[in-house]
């Protein structure tokens, strides 16, 4: 691109945008944020006032027609996404998509097709690929033969139906619960660390009528080297102390990751993490890729992100079908 500033438009003005993405981009001399859009026009106006953004919109389509820009930061909830990213890509806008990319493969595939056809640069908000902790794990596992990956996430009791009735998060058809929100992360970082993709997916949810979202869910994967993987999401009260997020079993040993703190190999500390801001690193790298036209410096693009999204969406569908095992190749190619 030319030496002039890269013009960014924000589609979605929630916490991710206000607390991370917008402040990060404002640290870069090469960027100007030209527009803020949110279905809650008051939120859009407040964001624009706070960060001195000149144009405000309530509709993504109106923003696409009303202002010239180079990059679309799509930070809306997944259920909101329809065709705004498709039109933006067709207009030559580079695309940053916060995760999850969509709640159906049909929508995600349409966006992916438009991005690839237009040849624009894209990425997904899988920020932890930029964190040295996960990069060190990836380096260690590079010459190992993985046999099983276990991920576990604990949380407090979910909101009761009466207390959460007015939030989109409480609507499972819109949010997918913690399994969608964190499941795409867990799937993506496992793919990143091991170099393996998911070929089969199955899931079960523990749902109770008093609660807005599930109390637990379990996802069972088969990976493309015949290894297995489980993801467990449990919302039942206080969390067990010092439980690892990830345990990767390989022929001859195991690697464990304790939150963003440390890596252990066979019970011995292998890497102790230091403070690091992966949000900022991802944003800086994405803008640099656009400046230079070199997408190879990105840790993933929109298309690669589909291989982390699809196993979770397939598991969600599996749970609706009483645990039917879903073939990922078939599921991903749904029109």
Image (tube, grey):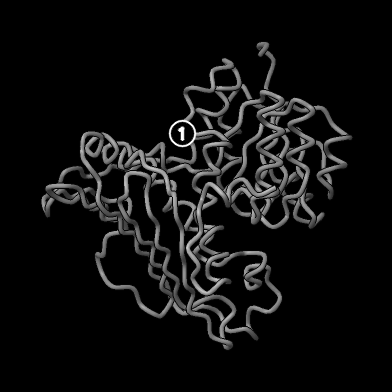
Q: Residue at x 44, y 46 (%)?
A: 188
Disc 1 secondary structure class: helix
- Residue 321 lies in quadrant: bottom right
In which quadrant will I find the N terminus? top right
Dot 1 alpha-carbon crowd within 10 angstroms: few under 14, some 14 to 19, many 20 or more: some
Task: Count numbered badges in the picture.
Answer: 1
In the image, 22 versus 93, the foreground residue is 93
Q: Residue at x 32, y 36 (%)?
A: 135
Q: Position of residue 61 (x, y in %)?
A: 85, 42
Q: Position of residue 174 (x, y in %)?
A: 67, 64
Q: Residue at x 60, y 23 (%)?
A: 29
- Where is 166 relative to 100, above or below? below
Q: Residue at x 26, y 44 (%)?
A: 273
Q: Is residue 321 left or right of residue 136?
A: right
- Extreme residue toward the top, this view: 2
- Residue 56 lies in quadrant: top right
- Where is 59 relative to 234, above or below? above
In the image, 6 versus 118, the foreground residue is 118
Which residue does the numbered mark 1 point to in the structure image? 281
- Extreme residue toward the bottom, this view: 210
Q: Position of residue 168 (x, y in %)?
A: 68, 68
- Where is 136 relative to 3, above or below? below
Q: Is residue 183 left or right of residue 35?
A: left
In the image, 233 versus 105, the foreground residue is 105
Q: Position of residue 114 (x, y in %)?
A: 72, 33
């Amino acid at each position: 691109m030319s030496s002039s500033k890269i013009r960014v438009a924000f589609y979605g003005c929630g916490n991710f945008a206000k607390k991370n993405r917008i402040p990060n981009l404002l640290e870069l001399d090469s960027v100007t944020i030209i527009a803020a859009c949110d279905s809650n026009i008051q939120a859009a106006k407040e964001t624009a006032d706070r960060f001195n953004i000149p144009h405000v919109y309530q509709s993504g389509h109106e923003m696409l027609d009303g202002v010239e820009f180079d990059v679309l930061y799509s930070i809306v909830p997944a259920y909101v996404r329809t065709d705004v990213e498709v039109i933006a890509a067709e207009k030559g806008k580079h695309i940053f998509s916060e995760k999850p990319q969509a709640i159906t493969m049909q929508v995600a595939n349409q966006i992916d097709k438009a991005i690839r056809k237009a040849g624009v640069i894209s990425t997904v908000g899988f920020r932890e690929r930029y964190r040295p902790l996960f990069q060190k794990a990836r380096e260690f596992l590079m010459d190992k033969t993985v046999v099983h990956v276990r991920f576990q996430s604990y949380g407090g009791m979910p909101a009761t139906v009466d207390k959460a009735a007015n939030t989109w998060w409480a609507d499972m058809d819109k949010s997918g619960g913690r399994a969608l929100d964190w499941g795409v992360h867990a799937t993506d970082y496992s793919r990143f660390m091991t170099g393996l993709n998911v070929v089969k997916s199955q899931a079960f949810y523990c749902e109770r009528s008093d609660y807005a979202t599930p109390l637990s869910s379990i996802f069972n994967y088969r990976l493309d080297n015949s290894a297995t993987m489980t993801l467990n999401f449990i919302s039942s009260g206080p969390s067990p102390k010092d439980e690892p997020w990830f345990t990767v079993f390989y022929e001859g040993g195991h690697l464990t990751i304790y939150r963003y703190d440390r890596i252990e190999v066979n019970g011995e500390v292998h890497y102790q993490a230091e403070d690091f801001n992966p949000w900022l690193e991802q944003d800086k790298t994405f803008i640099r890729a656009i400046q230079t036209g070199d997408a190879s410096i990105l840790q993933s693009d929109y298309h690669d992100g589909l291989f982390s999204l699809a196993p979770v969406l397939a598991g969600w569908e599996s749970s609706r079908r009483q645990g039917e095992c879903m073939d990922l190749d078939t599921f991903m190619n749904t029109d």
